[in-house]
Amino acid sequence: MTLSLAPAHFRGDPVSVARALLGGTLVRVLEGGERLTGRIVEVEAYDCPRDPACTAGRFHAARSAEMAIPPGTWLFWTAHGHPLLQVACRPEGVSASVLIRALQPLEGLGHMLSFRPVTRERDLTNGPAKLVYALGLNPARISGRPVNAPELHLLPPPAPLPDEEVEVTARVGSREGRTLPWRFTVRGNPWVSPAAPSMDLARPVSEK
């Protein structure tokens, strides 16, 4: 039986943690014991001591302080009114995290569709807010819980994904730090979010 990742696993550099988490499994256990699981196919890293996306402006500085919690703790970032699932990294007091951006559903598809009805199954969990709703997550109950909590935990990949199976890009929706290569996706996976990396959006049309 594969053991869930312990909080200590997340004490390191969130960029390395994010890359290693790709291909792992997010496990949601409902109160009745039903399991909703998905393969992690897209992640982003945020490392505020060296990340303009965290430190620019009063708003970002205040929000990044929310990440300065013990490593391996679940937290939610709200974007455009929607909750996004993250896990804190680095030692307590340092603002850093990994954002889980997309899942490939494995178990509990019927429950996911009841939480978030969609026309195309591919649209069910191919975005960070989408997966939160599809798993029926309540941020008020999950925030502050350890990453190996029974109701929501992470399993490591069966084996590290080789570099040729991983695509590295800039993050999505970042004005500051838009060139940082801190987004990792499973190359060619149809469940990766359709959003364009910020660096692509910044390029002149003639260069695209």
Image: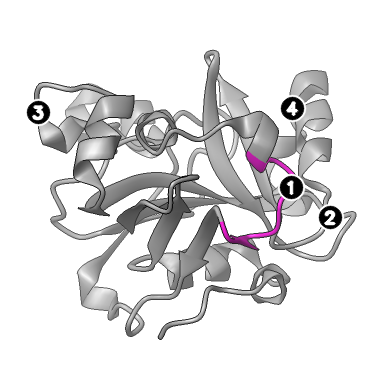
Query: Which amino acid, mark 3?
Result: Arg
Taking the spot 73% from the left edge, 71% from the top edge, the residue there is: 11
Q: Quadrant of residue 78?
A: top right
Q: Earlier in the sequence, mark 3 or mark 1?
A: 1
SS of the residue at dot 2? loop
Q: Is residue 47 above or below residue 4?
A: above
Question: Does residue 53 appear anywhere in the picture?
Answer: no
* Residue 147 counted in the magenta span: yes
The mark nearer the N terminus, 3 or 4, is: 4
The answer to whether residue 155 is above or below residue 201 is below
Viewer-closest of 186 and 177: 186
Q: 106 and 49: which one is in front?
A: 106
The disc label shown at residue 94, or none? 2
Quadrant of the rendering where the C terminus is positioned: top left
Q: Nearer the viewer, mark 3 or mark 4?
A: 3
Q: Earlier in the sequence, mark 4 or mark 1?
A: 1
Task: Work out whether mark 1 precedes mark 2 in sequence or the reverse, and give the earlier one.
Answer: 1
Q: Earlier in the sequence, mark 2 or mark 3?
A: 2
Q: Are marks 2 and 3 in contact (CB under 8 Å)?
A: no
Q: Label 3 belongs to which residue?
A: 120
Please name whichever residue, 59 or 73, is drawn nearer the observer in this view of the structure: 73
